[in-house]
Amino acid sequence: MNTTFTDFILPLLNIIFLDLILAGDNAIVIGLAARNLRGDTQKKAILLGTGGAIILRIIATILVVWLLKVPWLLLFGGLLLILIAYKLLTGENSEEAGDIQAGGTLWAAVRTIIVADAAMGLDNVIAIAGAANHNITLVIVGLLISVPIVVWGSTLFIKLINRYPWIIYIGSAVLGYTASTMITGEKKLEPFFGQHPVLHVLFIVLVIAGILAAGHWKRHLDHKKVPHSGTSG
């Protein structure tokens, strides 16, 4: 039972949490793409668009899980995830969502949702592939659980993050942990970290602390700039 929890349940919870944290922009995309449609047509666009996005996301994540077995790509994926964790804290990812145009018809909205999700979903794909530890079942189950939650609870979840900003810090810390374990799990580096367990733990702590410190500092600087640029408000 304990083995099942640590090998499947815990990573699954990690995947669901990461996907919810990273899916705020995707939820905005869904809302923007379908905003011009009415009633049942809007619901259909959201369901069909999200369904297509889930299928595409599962295929992409499976491909990334497979690619991460190639030497040094686990290291590259980990470094990329560190950048994504930093961007999550500084809010840089959310700027991309502002360019999404609303679809005028059902299929135009569906197409917009799928294409935009594919373009913006790289962070989710890499994070989930890293957290899944080569387990395809975890990838599929995690996405099937978390993506519908994002669709139906997107507005609520965005409000929750806005009200409790510390949730973003937890998300970035989890991403930092996933990134650092990807790097230390790289086959070329694994023997070194295996022989030096203290350095292994220290590296993980430094990655997480570095992300949180750099992200917090950037947020602080951005916050200080706001009053100067909008004194008339």
Image (cartoon, grey):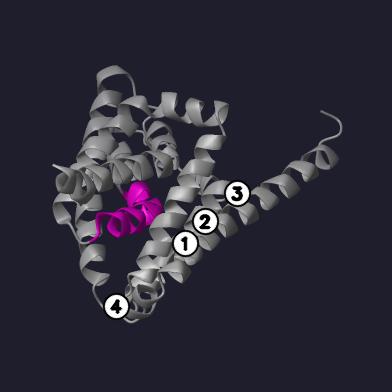
Labels 3 and 2 touching (C-beta < 8 A): no
Q: Nearer the viewer, residue 124 or 180?
A: 180
Which mark is nearer the camera, 3 or 2? 2
By secondary structure, the bulk of the magenta-drawn segment is best described as helix
> Gap between marks 2 and 4, in whole Å?
21 Å
Q: Position of residue 130 (x, y in %)?
A: 31, 59
Q: Is residue 122 magenta?
A: yes
Of the numbered discs in the image, which one, if any, rests on residue 187? 4
Q: Residues within 10 Å of mark 3 (few under 14, many from 20)?
A: some
| Residue at the top extreme of this rendering | 39
Above/below status of 8 relative to 181: above
CA separation in Å, label 1 and label 4:
17 Å
Q: Does dot 2 land on a helix, a strand or a loop? A: helix
Kindly check if marks 4 and 3 are in contact, taking CB atoms under 8 A apart as contact: no
- The residue tagged 2 is 208
Task: Pinpoint residue 59: horizontal percent, then vertical percent.
Answer: 19, 56
Which residue carries the number 1 mark? 204
CA distance for labels 4 and 3 = 32 Å
- Earlier residue among tags 1 and 3: 3
Residue numbers of the magenta segment: 115-133
Residue 205's place in the image compared with 15, above or below, is: below
Tell me where residue 183 sits by quadrant.
bottom left
Q: Which residue is mark 3?
A: 90
Q: Quadrant of the N terminus?
A: top left
- Residue found at x 38% / y 70%: 184
Is 19 situated left or right of 140 in this image? Answer: right
Q: Give the residue displayed 29% in from the left and 41% down from the top.
A: 13
Query: Along the polypeptide, which appears first: circle 4 or circle 3?
Result: 3
Question: Type of residue at label 2?
Answer: Ile
